[in-house]
Amino acid sequence: MKVSVTNKAIIKLAAPISLALLIPQVSFLTNTAFLGRLGEKELGVNGITGIFYLILAMVGYGLSSGMQIQMARRSGEGDKKGLANLFSNGVMLALAFALGLMLIALWLAPVIFGFGLHSSENIFLSVDYLYIRVWGLPFLMLTQLFNAFYISIQKSRFLIYGSLVATIMNVFWDYTLIFGKFGFPKMGLEGAAVAAIIAEVFYFLTMLGLFYVHRMFYEYPIMRFRSFDLALSRRTLKVASPLIVQFLFSIGGWQIFFIFIEHLGTKELAASQILRSIFGIVGVVTWAFATASNSMVSNVIGQGKQREVIWLVLKICKLSFIFTLIICALLLGFSKEFLSMYCNDPSMAAFATPSLRVIVSAMLVMSLATVVFNGVVGSGKTMVNLTMEICCVVAYLIYCYIVIERMRSPLWLCWGSEFVYWISLLLASFIYLRSGRWKGKSI
């Protein structure tokens, strides 16, 4: 399927993705609000462990993004059998990666938390939570692959259905297991982990069901390709591995940020977990347009229209900035009401407000940086993306070490690290895209 580069085509692809991202944010907001009612310690630990699990999830996202680039290229070329082969082989790769990540996480989590955290209670709660949470990883990675497939064939609206099912399940089981309702035991933080696994299972089953309900196996004969294709896997990993390492650096930097924040105190950690939800809210728009940029750039290149790439990316940037500006204005205008959703303590909301203003401002830069960066990703030059990511994360971590760990600065200044990261990423991506060095890449 070949895409056009009109505003209508961009929004048509991005809007369902945005809605699919928005729906899980309801789950994330309620999860944070429920744990906020338990106490600052549970809320803070959920932030640390959530970032660690996000690192694992982003390995899967990097793998699926690499396959999405290839599937979108096959879609632009009209090669449906080649796309089906990529998808089938991707299922095997995703399951292998999930098993490996589970084993690594079960071994590594106690080491990382034991070394990085100061509070012994935080260490115990974090490890206990992760030992439950990782069992949802295989279902999550298969879901990511299905999402990449649907986006590459311009069926992004399917993502909405899976997100809706997962969110309903997560909110219900969060409430039931965290507080012990409807005859179930009160599990607290562990209940949140079990609820998340249940949601991931149902998300995967929904995406799988859509494939068969719409009888897509006739158009994309995935069952013809049952054996593992080593040569295809190598080509896939050649594209995906830089993205995987890139996401590890990106989210790994955030993990270090939260560990540094834990050293400042429980209140700072709890407030930062609340503030982290802002990335989910603003990311509803930003990451939807970024994903559209990734897929559309690859599709347009597959059509042989490389001259339209920069123009396409700039159009997506404009739309991303406008929609993000609207959301940021609402967050600033109703900051008190937004922060009060998470806890009953007015002092916590007042404490987090200055940092909220810093983050919202940084998100405007993010709305541009993610789109331009994913335009480079869509070109297939993933090693270039990795180099950019490493440089930007290094700059980010230097800022975090000096401002947080050494200077023990106020929380709002700590969150200024977001400006360092996103401005660096925007400049590096834009300069490279304008250079034209990405042209002629075959994947």
Image: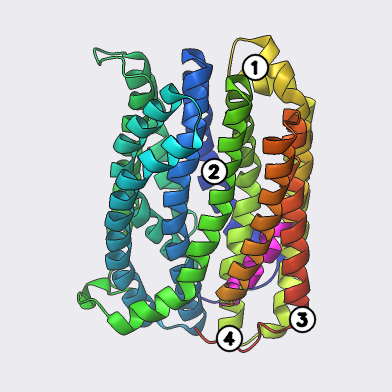
Of badges 2 and 3, the one in the foreground is 2
Whether residue 328 is visible: no
Residue neighbourhood size for the residue with mark 2, other residues' Cα within 10 Å, grouped as few (<14), some (14–19), many (≥20): many
Residue marked by disc 4: 441
Q: Which sits earlier in the primary sequence, circle 1 or circle 2?
A: 2
Element type at marker 1? helix
Alpha carbon separation for disc pair 1 and 4: 50 Å
Alpha carbon separation for disc pair 1 and 2: 25 Å
Residue marked by disc 3: 435
Q: Which sits earlier in the primary sequence, circle 1 or circle 4?
A: 1
Q: Are marks 2 and 3 in contact (CB under 8 Å)?
A: no
Of badges 3 and 1, the one in the foreground is 3
In the rendered view, would you say 396 is above or below 6?
A: above
Residue neighbourhood size for the residue with mark 4, other residues' Cα within 10 Å, grouped as few (<14), some (14–19), many (≥20): few
Amino acid of disc 4: Lys
Element type at marker 4? loop
Q: Nearer the viewer, residue 75 or 36?
A: 36
Element type at marker 2? helix
Whole-percent x and y of residue 75? 47, 77
